[in-house]
Amino acid sequence: MIDLSMQYLGLKLSGPIVVASTPLSESIDNIRHMEDAGASAVVLTSLFEEQLALESRALDDDLSRGTDSFAESLGFLPDLEDYRMTHEIYLENLRKAREAVAIPIMASLNGATTGGWVRFARDMEQAGASAIELNTYALATDAGQTSSDLEKQLLDLVKSVCQAVKLPVSVKLSQSFTSIPNMSKQLQGAGAAGVVLFNRFYQPDFDIEALEVRPTLHFSTPSELLPRLHWAAILFGHLNIDIGITGGVHSAEDVLKCIMAGGNCAMMVSAIHIHGIDHIARVLSDMCYWLEKREYTSLAETRGCLSRRSVPDTSPFDRGNYIKTLSSYSLRQTVAAF
Ligand SMILES: Cc1cc2nc3c(=O)[nH]c(=O)nc-3n(C[C@H](O)[C@H](O)[C@H](O)COP(=O)(O)O)c2cc1C
């Protein structure tokens, strides 16, 4: 029997497959099903800074209207039952999930700026989260804002969340930093226990008939995994920070690649939406078969074996690969054309 356990954010995971943030985990039955299928942890859907800001603004408005006149205020004051706000529902789901399963449940906070909302990290800790994943999806649309402004904003945010809780904090990173290794190193300095590579960049699509720009969400394909593998392989062994990989993990081969690149776990969402929760069990079984055939006794022993640090020829990770790839393509094209 192969030992599939992995360490991630100081937690012992029973296996490498973590369910990344998805609305599927808003149902406790689904979370039970994920555990039964072999998921080793679940990241809950995100609580957004904007939701929390809206809630507190609504509460402030109602309360300040209430100060005009006491008699009048009785009519305006919010019925407390109506103020079972998003974050309370979130925390309740977190507590229920915690009670329902033995695997770690990680909460997800999604925001871009420091502020009062960061204190919800503490509420998540009290509600039983095993870790907090910080999703910092920020887009640079202001030409006056430099990349170092954005990096500082991110680091300040991470520091304030890490200071608010004792839990391990991971940061789900965008792929667009100029230096992923330097950013990861700075995040480690700010207190992060892990980086999650990478947030998907959800671009809106353009409808040229209706002259509208619309949000689109397509499920991933395994080809999206390659940049994640590349950066995990470069980070592995150089920093004291764990690596979660999300984006394009669909099959047993994908999970093995994540671990061999240096990941501590492989996170899955699209494949579960497409094939159902039991897909996790099939992937784990395929992976065990592959490992057993090659006489491995544990998955952990494969970790990082294809990282930049472990392979004899590092050129596939460097500029050499870029030159080789482009020149081999033009050669093939020339042969095909004549
Ligand atoms: C329907 C849907 C909802 C998602 N919601 C969140 C979210 O709330 N927070 C978050 O950090 N990621 C969210 N994600 C991104 C996933 O957690 C994951 O990182 C991404 O889908 C890439 O993994 P995949 O290739 O396995 O789908 C969502 C993805 C999908 C498909």
Image: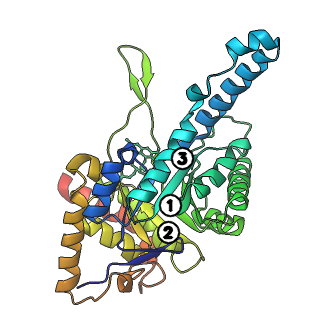
Q: Quadrant of the C terminus?
A: bottom left
Mark 1: C-beta under 8 Å from nearest atom of ligand 1: yes
Local packing at callout 3 (Cα closer than 10 Å; few below 14, some 14-19, many 20+) is many
For residue 72, side relative to residue 39 (left or right): right
Q: How far apart are the two marked residues, 1 and 3, measured between alpha carbons?
A: 23 Å
- Whether pointer 1 and pointer 3 mark residues with C-beta atoms closer than 8 Å, the reply is no
Give the number of the disc on residue 243.
2
In the picture of the structure, the residue carrying the numbered disc 1 is: 196
How far from the left and from the top, in percent, is residue 123?
63, 51
Give the number of the disc on residue 91.
3
For residue 37, side relative to residue 311 (left or right): left
Q: How far apart are the two marked residues, 2 and 1, measured between alpha carbons?
A: 6 Å
- Identify which amino acid the numbered label 3 is placed on: Leu
Q: Nearer the viewer, residue 80 or 244?
A: 80
- Identify which amino acid the numbered label 2 is placed on: Ile
The residue drawn where x is 35% and y is 83% is 302
* Local SS, label 2: strand
Q: Nearer the viewer, residue 333 or 243?
A: 243
